[in-house]
Amino acid sequence: MTTLLLIRHGEVPGISPPRFRGRQELELTERGRAQAQRTAERVHADRPEIAGIYCSPRHRTVATAKAIGAPHGLEPNALPDLDDMDYGTWQGLSYDEAKDRWPEQWALWNSAPESVAFPNGETLADLAARVSRGLRNVLEASRERGGAVIIVAHDSVNRVLLMQLLGMPLRFYRALAQDPCCINVIDEPGPAAHVRLINSTEHLRGL
């Protein structure tokens, strides 16, 4: 049986107050580094055998994945298909700035996110197709190895992957929370997926 640990990166600037971070290169905050270390300890305790660790190419995901892979002696493989949402012209903007400049699209993003095409960026359907391809490549590369497979990615990437595995339409994008360094556990990721844990952050208590 294949088990996937789907993890979000640690805290970075722009999470609170929120901005459209997307493809921006952001470093983990001090708290984010502590979250990554605590997550590494939790994963190592629960999953002594890891088949491989994969991540988005952004600095924040690579740093989190390096921390998680270190106790296992594993270096992460960065895959472009696992990259964050391309917000195009909205990248780097605060929510208030996007709302003021594109009020109609902002309203649609909050009411029907599956209908929004970010100016010069992606749609949720684009993201879903890309990350689905990334997941297939990860599972194929790890097929012959023992242990769990780890993906360290982003809020939007994780939500879309989970919705696919749960058979949820993209309009439910906001239904699934993904906090920094949360852990999701999925057995047999694919058509017969069994999602056993979503957005677990118990290991981060006190941080």
Image (tube, rainbow, N blue to C red):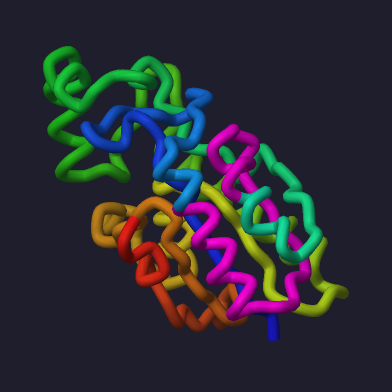
In the picture, residue 98 is in which quadrant?
top left
- Residue at 59%, 33% in the rendered image: 59
Please, what is the dominant secondary structure of the magenta stretch?
Answer: helix
Decide if residue 152 is in sight here: yes
- Residue at 54%, 37% in the rendered image: 60
Image location (x, y in percent) of residue 189: 59, 73
Q: Which residue sits furthest right? A: 144
Q: Which residue sits furthest bottom? A: 1
In the picture, residue 108 is in which quadrant?
top left
Image location (x, y in percent) of residue 24: 48, 23
- Residue at 70%, 43% in the rendered image: 79
Decide if residue 133 is in sight here: no
Horizontal relation, residue 129 to residue 149: left or right: left
- Residue at 27%, 43% in the rendered image: 113
Q: Name the foreground residue: 54 vs 124.
A: 54
Count numbered badges in the picture.
0
Give yes or no for residue 161 being in the magenta stretch. no
**Quadrant for the C terminus in the image:** bottom left
Image location (x, y in percent) of residue 133: 65, 52
Q: Is residue 57 above or below residue 74?
A: above
Horizontal relation, residue 128 to residue 173: left or right: right
Q: Is residue 173 above or below residue 106?
A: below
Give yes or no for residue 40 being in the magenta stretch. yes
Image location (x, y in percent) of residue 67: 63, 52
Q: Is residue 35 above or below residue 4?
A: above
Question: What is the magenta range?
Answer: 35-64
Horizontal relation, residue 90 to residue 148: left or right: left
Q: Name the foreground residue: 94 vs 138.
A: 94
**Quadrant for the N terminus in the image:** bottom right
